[in-house]
Amino acid sequence: MTSEANEHAVDPSADGFSTDESAFQSCTLCPRRCGAHRAQGQAGLCGATSTLRVARSALHYWEEPPISGDSGSGAIFFSGCPLRCVFCQNHEISHEGFGLEVSVRRLAQMMLELQDQGALNINLVTPMHFLPQIREALPLARKAGLRLPIVCNTSGYELPQAVDAMSDVIDIWLTDFKYASPRLAGRLSAVRDYPEVATVALSRMLEALRRAGGELLDDDGIMKRGIIVRHLVLPGHADDSCAVLDRVWELCGNEVDISVMNQYTPNDYCRQKGGLLARSVTDQEYEQVLDHADDLGFERMWWQQGGTVSESFVPAFDATGVRGPELKA
């Protein structure tokens, strides 16, 4: 399903990055820099053309407590993804491209609708391959009365230029850090450069957070500004998980929260292929990673109870909340 032969070695500091629609002429929005002519209808390695597509817009209750609280996070799930993780649970939208075409003004209106439903924040899920449209939609929504913090829910595989370009409109970075091993990243997500790219991206997120004044929680512990670094423990790879935590600690210390997840569940592909990814994470593996996090000194850490499975956290991708009126001019 993936192979190291199709990876693209990337210099994260390379030039040619654009934040307007010219980026879609020869796409350089993600570290793959595939050069797809998305404006002409050619799909990039993310699976998306320049047409903005959304699979779901609804309250989501299964993020970390500072994000979802009791009221829910206003999650907008975008179609497509620059990664090709063999174990992905959101394959309907990340690999298969499910989603409906929406305008920038409809996207802005969705944000206002979620606010009216009581969302604690606007949670943009895998959004950065649509960065130009999101940069356009957010000011429209703010002008029309949007008051909520904006969450960028990302795989962590982002160009530093993209992080910098969004740092003035993103309040909370909810970012994965999937791998410390380039070989593992290549085998499971077709991006050997993931550890390097994710490290640079996280450093830019941290710089942006520091400029904004650091983490901010309200009296109920709901995050208004900050970074949560997520890591999914994979079966048979607890040592790499510990190495990921080493990287995050060295870079960020306790300036960020961490979320160590044990919700790995084999999808059909992994079950059929067999091997380590055909089983769940053992209690021993998960405890090894949690103990390492404690030993490093992380003070704000989120973890999951035993028996958790990914399907429990995956909503129905059925275009809920996507259709509707556009924001009025």
Image: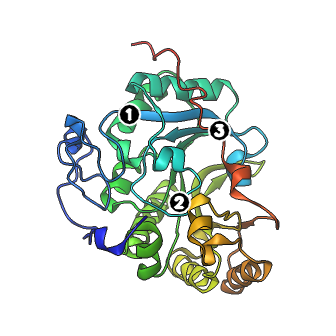
Location of mark 3 (residue): 316
Dots 3 and 1: beta carbons under 8 Å? no
- Tell me the SS state at disc 3: loop
Location of mark 2 (residue): 175
Q: Amino acid at mark 2?
A: Thr
How many C-alpha atoms fall within 10 Å of the one at disc 2: few (<14), some, or many (≥20)?
many
Q: Amino acid at mark 3?
A: Ala
Pick whichever, 224 or 173, lies toward us.
173
Indicate the position of residue 44 as horizontal and vertical percent values.
29, 49
Indicate the position of residue 31 as horizontal and vertical percent values.
31, 62
Indicate the position of residue 291 as horizontal and vertical percent values.
74, 83
Q: Which residue is depicted at the point 35% across and 43% down?
A: 48
Give left or right: position of 75 versus 98. Answer: right
Q: Amino acid at mark 1?
A: Leu
From this view, report whether residue 52 is shown above or below residue 83.
above
Whichever of callouts 3 and 2 sits on the residue coming sooner in the sequence is 2
Q: Nearer the viewer, mark 2 or mark 1?
A: 1
How many C-alpha atoms fall within 10 Å of the one at disc 3: few (<14), some, or many (≥20)?
few
